[in-house]
Image (spheres, grey):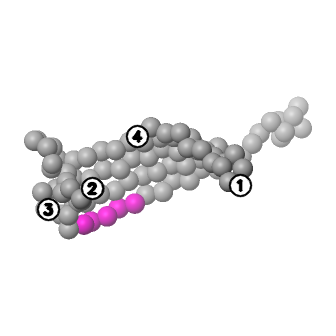
């Protein structure tokens, strides 16, 4: 039974990373998202060796009435078929 337990267990590797930024203006595709004001943003990402990934990113924003922030969530699964071909299927 002990030998079977050793064969059945696997080690999974995952990575969690984070990012943060302070900018004088938040631009997206050339459009101001903060009305010319400064922006503070940050995110957290999770990636597993299986190819699964998920994360979030947030920033203050004010391009719509009563808007105070933007929150983006995303997840997906990606990998390589061979040296020249890879895939990535996700949701934003």
Query: Rounded to the nearest whole Å, what is the CA distance between mark 3 and mark 2?
Result: 14 Å
10 Å crowding of disc 1: few (<14), some (14-19), many (20+): few
Whether residues under marks 1 and 2 lie with C-beta atoms below 8 angstroms apart, the answer is no
Q: Which residue is mark 4?
A: 92
* Residue 32 visible, this angle: yes
Q: Which numbered disc flags the more N-terminal residue, 4 or 2?
A: 2
Q: Nearer the viewer, mark 3 or mark 2?
A: 2
Q: Which numbered disc flags the more N-terminal residue, 1 or 2?
A: 2
Q: Position of residue 44 (x, y in %)?
A: 42, 52
Residue sitting at x 48%, y 57% = 17
Q: Quadrant of residue 6?
A: top right
Q: Position of residue 87 (x, y in %)?
A: 60, 44
- Is residue 19 depicted above or below 88 in this figure? below
Q: Nearer the viewer, mark 4 or mark 1?
A: 1
Whether residues under marks 3 and 2 lie with C-beta atoms below 8 angstroms apart, the answer is no
Q: State the residue in front, 48 or 37.
A: 37
Q: Nearer the viewer, mark 1 or mark 3?
A: 1
Q: Which residue is mark 3?
A: 37
Query: Rounded to the nearest whole Å, what is the CA distance between mark 4 and mark 2?
Result: 16 Å
Q: Which numbered disc flags the more N-terminal residue, 3 or 2?
A: 2
> Mark on residue 28?
2
Q: Which residue is mark 1?
A: 83
Q: Position of residue 12 (x, y in %)?
A: 67, 46
What is the residue that sits farthest to the top in this orientation?
Answer: 1
Q: Nearer the viewer, mark 4 or mark 2?
A: 2
């Amino acid at each position: 039974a002990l030998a079977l337990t050793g064969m059945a267990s696997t080690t999974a590797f995952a990575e969690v990373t984070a990012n943060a930024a302070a900018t004088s203006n938040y631009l997206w595709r050339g459009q101001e998202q903060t009305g010319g004001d400064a922006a503070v943003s940050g995110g957290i990402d999770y990636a597993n060796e299986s190819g699964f990934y998920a994360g979030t990113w947030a920033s203050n924003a004010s391009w719509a009435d009563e808007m105070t922030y933007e929150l983006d969530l995303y997840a997906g699964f990606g990998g390589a078929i061979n040296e020249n071909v890879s895939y990535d299927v996700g949701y934003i």
